[in-house]
Amino acid sequence: MTEYRYLKYETFDDGKVVRISLNRPERRNAQSRGLLVELDEAFLRAERDDVVRVVILAGEGPTFSSGHDLGSREYLAESTPGPSQHPTYGFNGGTRLAAERRMLQEHHYFQENTKRWRNLRKITIAQVQGEIFAAGLMLAWACDLIVAAENARFADPVGPRLGGAGVEYFAHPWEFGPRKAKELLLTGDAIDADEAHRLGMVSKVFPVEDLAQRTLEFAQRIALVPTAASLGTKEAVNQSVDAQGFQIALSAAFSLHHVLHAHWAELHGSDWPLAKEEDGVPDWRTAPPVALAVKDSVGGAWA
């Protein structure tokens, strides 16, 4: 039996449904390298198991995922050379220098793994609540369906707070629509669960206290569909989106993402690849809460 440090792995209905839960609630399920590596293993474990039909991706605690872990002690320990460094910093570009190292590492651990989970040979459902920010969006968007709690908020504030152009898996125009994507990326504002449902990004919305049970019931219903039919449906839709240019768009946006990383690192003469306060962004550690985008206010509303 695999032991996980950062996840929970549960089975239901004699193994037909699996629930993988991010388990760093004290860090709002921020995505450390250790968590991402374990998540990849857990997804592949479910994929290998022919009994499994549906995989639920959830998050323990009040927040699904607040994004990448940028500064916790655990992150610093796993990313700094020494006995506590995660082994993945020693390969897949980890021993290269400067922008090449950063781009190769993010290619493998941020973009390619998200694409692999999107194409998993199971039906996947994201069960989300609270904050789904930045890289939290990547995890939800990798899933075939999203079930949200009424308190869910979706945002990518990377531009206004870090000087970027969105996260590494740039599905924003496909999920939000082009103009809404520009608005949300330029303001850093969030949309709520009802707006996400109206846009078609979210399938179901339930009270927080009912979210886990109702998502499980939804998964159980989908698990009744013959696997050949469910996977055929998934592949037909994914191929249709890919034919519209989705994969090419991801690669193009990823390149721009790293142009901005290189810009900030060169500007500051350091290895810090993000904007700083002197560049006109707030300190991300003390920035005010993400506001909710509203149609009759240019400033947004505090959620």
Image: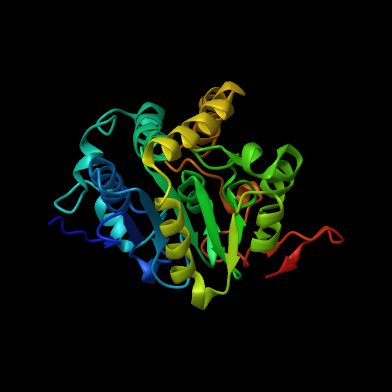
Snapshot quadrant of residue 30:
bottom left
Q: Which residue is at the front of the view, 193 or 183? A: 193
Q: Which residue is at the front of the view, 268 or 143? A: 143
Spot occupied by residue 245 in the image (x, y as percentages of width and height)? 59, 23
Spot occupied by residue 192 in the image (x, y as percentages of width and height)? 66, 62
The answer to whether residue 19 is above or below residue 99 is: below
Kindly identify the residue that appears in the image at 53 percent across and 59 percent down: 147
Snapshot quadrant of residue 98:
top left
Scheme of image coloration: rainbow
Q: Residue furthest bottom?
A: 209
- Left or right placement of residue 111 versus residue 198 in this view: left
Q: Is residue 30 visible?
A: no
Kindly identify the residue that appears in the image at 34 percent across and 48 percent down: 53
The answer to whether residue 129 is above or below residue 116 is: below
Kindly identify the residue that appears in the image at 62 percent across and 46 percent down: 159
Spot occupied by residue 238 in the image (x, y as percentages of width and height)? 52, 32
- Left or right placement of residue 67 versus residue 22 in this view: right
Looking at the figure, which quarter contains the N terminus?
bottom left
Q: Which residue is at the front of the view, 221 or 21? A: 221
The answer to whether residue 123 is above or below residue 277 is: above
Looking at the figure, which quarter contains the C terminus?
bottom right
Q: Is residue 23 visible?
A: yes
